[in-house]
Amino acid sequence: MAALGPRPLHVLRILDETGDTQIGYDPDDAAAVRQVEERFEELMRRNFVAFDVSTQPGRLLRTFDPEAKEIIISHQFSGG
């Protein structure tokens, strides 16, 4: 039987004017989760939108979900 490796990291991807920033975190590490959650909340206060893209179909997030394997957060888009 093959040994299992470490649990894969979950990722928060931030799409903003600086590019695509990826922050990996272990959902079992409370301190790491809290840091990512604080960043998520900061961006949400700046009117960013977030999606859990680890599920099909993806889902809109209004609060941080540390169990989401991949979250993409970006500026709101507007048409015109």
Image (cartoon, rainbow, N blue to C red):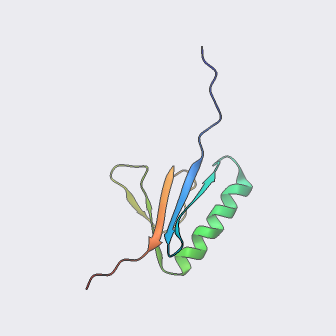
Q: Which residue lies at the image location 36% right of the left edge and 77% below the top edge?
A: 77
Q: Which residue lies at the image location 40% right of the left edge and 49% below the top edge?
A: 55
50 with respect to 67 (left or right): left
70 with respect to 8 (left or right): left
**Residue at the outermost left position:** 80
**Residue at the outermost right position:** 31
**Where does the C terminus fall, quadrant-wise?**
bottom left
Nearer-the-camera pick, 70 or 60: 70
Q: Which residue lies at the image location 60% right of the left edge and 75% below the top edge?
A: 42
38 with respect to 14 (left or right): right
**Residue at the outermost top position:** 1
Counting the numbered discs, the total is 0
Residue 38 quadrant: bottom right
Q: Which residue lies at the image location 43% right of the left edge and 49% below the top edge?
A: 54
The answer to whether residue 61 is above or below residue 45 is above
The answer to whether residue 31 is above or below residue 17 is above
- Where residue 33 sits in the image (x, y, percent)? 66, 57
**Residue at the outermost front position:** 18
- Where residue 30 sits in the image (x, y, percent)? 71, 53
**Where does the N terminus fall, quadrant-wise?**
top right
- Where residue 75 sits in the image (x, y, percent)? 45, 76
The answer to whether residue 72 is above or below residue 9 is below
- Where residue 40 sits in the image (x, y, percent)? 58, 68
